[in-house]
Structures are given as structure tokens and as C-alpha cells.
Image: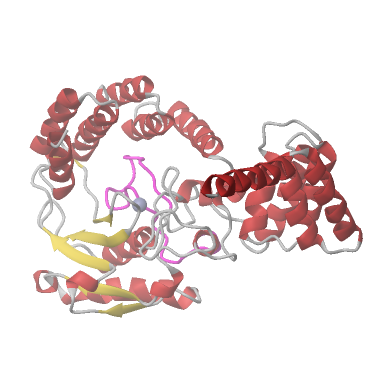
């Protein structure tokens, strides 16, 4: 009795299996989808045509109707993703061409009002880093503020206020609980080894993101030097400009603009005023800064404090292109930069990190070696050794990784390098 029962179930299952896997059912769904499409029920039609293309992936009509039905829908996250996938599918047919043309239309619609941006440079490699929009106001904790003159904090607060007053969502509030802070402001003594002959290289402030390996953004540290290398206090304007720029980093604009009118501009032109080095002298957020930030906060993040899903997110590959396209764009930019400033190490260091993202460790090391042969600041020496350690780590050559990490540590002994050394020793 039991045996018969089992067989019966098997037969029923195999009938269902045959039914769903054969073109009979795909024909059935196709007709339903087509009549939904003809009567203007595009959402139903898209769902059914998707089913047909899953059952029968070489049905060019179903694929084309699927693409057309999708393009009639509001371009929310899921629609963007599906059209992007069609446009990048391995099948070269009319549906793919149609989806490609729709991407251009959708992109234009989504970027309306924020067209003028530097989002390609602002995102960190392939990562979209930003806070959850519901985490605002961001909580700010200030460490040892008594170590600096009062006008330091006044100007830092002024910079925070500009970001708030020029946007409709960026808000900050103070906290006494460091554990709960989103942004920690620190003041530290400037490095004793910042001078190299007559030239002194240093920055007024820098930002360090802290995230877990699975992409949870924990904190952004914004560290200011207490004095310059001669022991003099920074001017109010130096503190203000640096704060304005670094706050952009703490909000997730990890990269830099290539336009000197933007606050997030960065240059490495060492002939300029040493205080202006690495950052824009602009005291006002530009429209491009604001539009880039607005766009960043519409993109689906992969490194963020609270992971959520939303149909209002923009699908990043649709806006930025595929990972390889983004890397290729950056590659072209930095190659141009090197052609213009062949004597500056930063171009080679950045090119190396792109090759590393491509998984081309050989070229990455080659460019770091090239950077290493130039005149370097202590920071750059540190960065080259740190990056070599990371590249050898990724290439699973832990012996060499440790060797370079230790060299980096001898230049600057900070928590970043110690975390890396710990990670290498675990292997
Ligand atoms: Zn910067």
C-alpha cells in the first residue's frame, strides 16, 4: 500500500516536471502574457514573459516582449536591474539591443537634475559606501578637544553646518557615547617624520572608514593634526577648508573630484601652497559636490550601517556601468594624469590599485615599484609598502605581505597597519 502511494507521488511529480519544462507550458504562458501585454497590463505581462524566457531562453519574441513590457513600467530598482540584465545577456538578439537603448533612456530620466556630477570618481573602487538615510542625524563624538584652540571646533562646526544647510537630509547631532557615534573627531600630534629635506609633506586632516568584512559601516574617524610640522597652530581657514572636505569623505564621497571648483577636489601638485596640498581651497560646496552627494544617496549601497532594500534605490551598475567599465574609466583617467605629471607618485599608486581591483597583481606591483623610484613623502612611502602588503596578501604570498607590512609599520605605526599585520599572521 505504502509502495503504491510512493509511486503515485513520483508519477504526479514527473508530470508536473514535464509540464513546466516543456514548450507546451511556455506556449501557454506566452499566450497569457501576450494578451496581458495587448490589454496594457504591462506588469502582469512582464512577469509572464519573464517566466517564458526562463522556460525557453531562446524564444526571441518572448525576450523582446519582455524587454518592451519592462520598459513600459516605472523604472524602479527591480525594473532597472532586469533591463540591465537583458542588456548584458549573452544572447545577441533584438531584445538585448532594445534593452540597451532603454538603459540610456532610463539613465537620463533617473539622473534628471543631478547630471553634473563626479560620481565615477567619488565611489571607492567598486564599493558604494554611505550611511543609511534613516541614520541622520549622524551622531558626532569629539575626542580630546581641549588639546586644540577653541576656534578649531568652531570652524569644524561651521563646516558641518554648511553641509546641513546646503542639503535637505544631511544632519548631525552631538553624542557623549563614543560607541554609538557615526563620526569620531580626533586631534593628534603631527608626525615627527613629515619632512624630507627642505620639503614638508603632511595634511591638516584625514578620514578613515571602519567597516566589517561583510560590509557593515561602523564608524568614520576624522583626524586633525593639532599643529603643523613646525608646531604652529593652523589658521581658522585651514581648519575650516579641511573640515569641509573631510566631512564629504565621512558622508561617503570616498574619492575626489577632478575639478578645482569643487570642495572634493584633490591635487597633488607640490608646487602649490603646502597647506592647500591634496585639497581644494574652495570654501563653499559647489553644485557638483551637492549633486554627487544626492546621487550617492540614491544608489544602493554595499557598505552601509543598516542594510535595507528599497525599490527607490538606483541599481548601481545601471548608473555606473559594470565594475569593469568603471575600472576602465578610472584607468584611462589615471593614465592621462601620469602623462601630465610623470614625476608625481600618486598617479602610479592609484593606477596600481586599479590593476589590483582587476586582479592583475603583476601590473599593480610594477606601478608601485615605479612610484617607489620617485621622490616620496613619508606618507607615500608608507602607502606604497602598505599597498604592496595588501596585494601580496590577496595573491596569497603571506611571507612577502608580512615583509612589506613591517616596512610600512616602521614608517608609520598606526592601527590600520597593525590590523593588516594581525590579518596576515592569521594565515
Ligand atoms: Zn580627500
Please give the name of the residue rendered at 33% of the width and 48% of the height, measured from the top-left corner: 278
| Quadrant assignment, res 19 | top right
Q: Position of residue 352 (x, y in %)?
A: 36, 29
> Is residue 288 one of those drawn in magenta?
yes
Q: Report if residue 244 lies within the magenta region.
A: no
Residue 361 image position (x, y, % from top left): 35, 24
- Give the magenta-colored segment's residue range: 265-289
Is 336 located above or below residue 87 in the figure? above
What residue is shown at x 18% (from left), y 46% (from top)?
A: 416
Instruction: Please state if 22 lies on the left or on the right of 227 as rendered.
Output: right
Position of residue 163 measured from the top left corner of the image (x, y, whole percent): 42, 71
Number of marks in the rendered image: 0
Q: Identify whether 1 is placed above or below 114.
A: above
Work out whether residue 400 or residue 262 is closer to the camera in this orientation and state it: 400
Q: Quadrant of the C terminus?
A: top left
Image spot of residue 417 (x, y percent): 16, 42
Can I make out residue 226 in this image?
Answer: no
Q: Is 397 placed left or right of 283 in the picture?
A: left
Between 14 and 8, the residue placed more toward the observer is 8
Above or below, 363 against 50 in this view is above
Amino acid at each position: 500500500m505504502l509502495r503504491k502511494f510512493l509511486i503515485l507521488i513520483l508519477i504526479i511529480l514527473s508530470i508536473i516536471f514535464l509540464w513546466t519544462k516543456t514548450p507546451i507550458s511556455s506556449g501557454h504562458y506566452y499566450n497569457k502574457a501576450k494578451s496581458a501585454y495587448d490589454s496594457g497590463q504591462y506588469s502582469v505581462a512582464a512577469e509572464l514573459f519573464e517566466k517564458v524566457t526562463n522556460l525557453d531562453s531562446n524564444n526571441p519574441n518572448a525576450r523582446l516582449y519582455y524587454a518592451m513590457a519592462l520598459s513600459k513600467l516605472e523604472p524602479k530598482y527591480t525594473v532597472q536591474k532586469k533591463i540591465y540584465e537583458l542588456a548584458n545577456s549573452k544572447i545577441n538578439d533584438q531584445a538585448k539591443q532594445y534593452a540597451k537603448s532603454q538603459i540610456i533612456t532610463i539613465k537620463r530620466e533617473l539622473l534628471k537634475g543631478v547630471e553634473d556630477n563626479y560620481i565615477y570618481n567619488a565611489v571607492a573602487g567598486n564599493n558604494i559606501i554611505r550611511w543609511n538615510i534613516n541614520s541622520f542625524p549622524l551622531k558626532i563624538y569629539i575626542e580630546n578637544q581641549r588639546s586644540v584652540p577653541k576656534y578649531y571646533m568652531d570652524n569644524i562646526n561651521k563646516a558641518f553646518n554648511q553641509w546641513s544647510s546646503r542639503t535637505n537630509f544631511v544632519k548631525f547631532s552631538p553624542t557623549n557615547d563614543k560607541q554609538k557615534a557615526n563620526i569620531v573627531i580626533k586631534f593628534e600630534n603631527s608626525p615627527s617624520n613629515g619632512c624630507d629635506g627642505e620639503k614638508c609633506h603632511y595634511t591638516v586632516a584625514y578620514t578613515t572608514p571602519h567597516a566589517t568584512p561583510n560590509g557593515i559601516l561602523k564608524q568614520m574617524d576624522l583626524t586633525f593634526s593639532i599643529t603643523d610640522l613646525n608646531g604652529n597652530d593652523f589658521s581658522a581657514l585651514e581648519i575650516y577648508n579641511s573640515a569641509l572636505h573631510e566631512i564629504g569623505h565621512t558622508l561617503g564621497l570616498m574619492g575626489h573630484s577632478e575639478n578645482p571648483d569643487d570642495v572634493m577636489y584633490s591635487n597633488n601638485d607640490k608646487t602649490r601652497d603646502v597647506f592647500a596640498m591634496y585639497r581644494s581651497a574652495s570654501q563653499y560646496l559647489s553644485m557638483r559636490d551637492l549633486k554627487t552627494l544626492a546621487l550617492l544617496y540614491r544608489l544602493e549601497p554595499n557598505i552601509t550601517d543598516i542594510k535595507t532594500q528599497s525599490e527607490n534605490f538606483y541599481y548601481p551598475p545601471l548608473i555606473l556601468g559594470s565594475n569593469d567599465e568603471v575600472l576602465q574609466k578610472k584607468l584611462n583617467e589615471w593614465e592621462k594624469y601620469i602623462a601630465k605629471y610623470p614625476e608625481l607618485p600618486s598617479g602610479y599608486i592609484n593606477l596600481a590599485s586599479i590593476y589590483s581591483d582587476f586582479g592583475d597583481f603583476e601590473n599593480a606591483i610594477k606601478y608601485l615599484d615605479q612610484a617607489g623610484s620617485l621622490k616620496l613623502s613619508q606618507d607615500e612611502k608608507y602607502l606604497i609598502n602598505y599597498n604592496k602588503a595588501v596585494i601580496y596578501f590577496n595573491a596569497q604570498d603571506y611571507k612577502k605581505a608580512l615583509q612589506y607590512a613591517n616596512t610600512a609599520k616602521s614608517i608609520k605605526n598606526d592601527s590600520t597597519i597593525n590590523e593588516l599585520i594581525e590579518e596576515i599572521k592569521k594565515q
